Image (tube, helix red, strand yellow):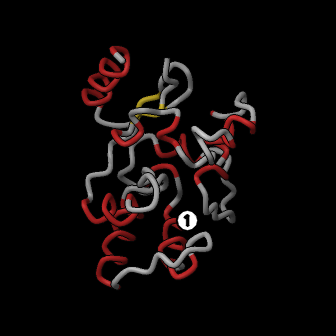
Amino acid sequence: MKRIAILSCIATLLGGAVAFAEGGALVPPITDAATLKECGACHMAFPPQFLPARSWEKLMGGLANHFGENASLPEATRAAIAAYLTAHAADAPTTKHGRRFMRGIATAATPLRVTQTPFWQDGHSEISPGRFASPAVKTAANCTACHRDAAQGAFGEDE
């Protein structure tokens, strides 16, 4: 816990995402209230840096069938969240260290799940698939089951 606090301070001083020694990531936490409220109502609001803008555009354009659920929002709310996500996406010009999250994603590819990205897959390659199916985790997309500080943008290995 102490190490995460120190890394948080370093990241603040450096002004952006910093890699943890274990290969995790430290990204700015989501600051948009609508994104936190609407996305967080069903799952953790994923950091926009984890996907390219084209992925967020497709996800936000298909909320009527969002992984089998109707997650439709009023148009103004949907548009505001989409704008926030794309402005902070991995390939957005102002996203620091975004290339790290884009590495390995083909130009023509539009991953719709963070767990489909090479960054995520490389970082979780040593974890058995059974661990994600355990009752405590349930799914690979449940970041907070293993990364206690994920909501604050800290995705290092918990000790």
Q: In percent of the image, x 38 and y 34: which residue is there?
A: 149
How many tags in the picture?
A: 1
Q: Quadrant of the N terminus?
A: top left
Tell me residue 67's x, y (percent): 61, 69
Mark 1 residue crowding within 10 angstroms, few (<14) / some (14–19) / many (20+)? many
Q: Does residue 67 appear left or right of residue 88 in this picture?
A: right
Q: In percent of the image, x 55 and y 21: which residue is there?
A: 22
**Residue farthest to the bottom?**
75
Is residue 41 depicted above or below 4 in this figure? Answer: below
Is residue 78 depicted above or below 138 in this figure? Answer: below
Is residue 149 depicted above or below 21 in this figure? Answer: below
Q: Does residue 155 appear left or right of residue 28 in this picture?
A: right
Q: Quadrant of residue 36?
A: bottom left
Tell me residue 76's x, y (percent): 29, 82
Q: In percent of the image, x 43 and y 50: which residue is there?
A: 47
**Residue farthest to the front?**
135
Q: Does residue 15 appear left or right of residue 154 in this picture?
A: left
Q: Mark 1 is on which residue type? A: Ser
Q: In percent of the image, x 64 and y 64: which residue is there?
A: 110
Secondary structure category for the residue under label 1:
helix
Tell me residue 144's x, y (percent): 47, 40
Residue nearer the viewer, 93 or 155: 155
Is residue 126 depicted above or below 95 in this figure? Answer: above
**Residue farthest to the top?**
2
Label 1: which residue? Answer: 55
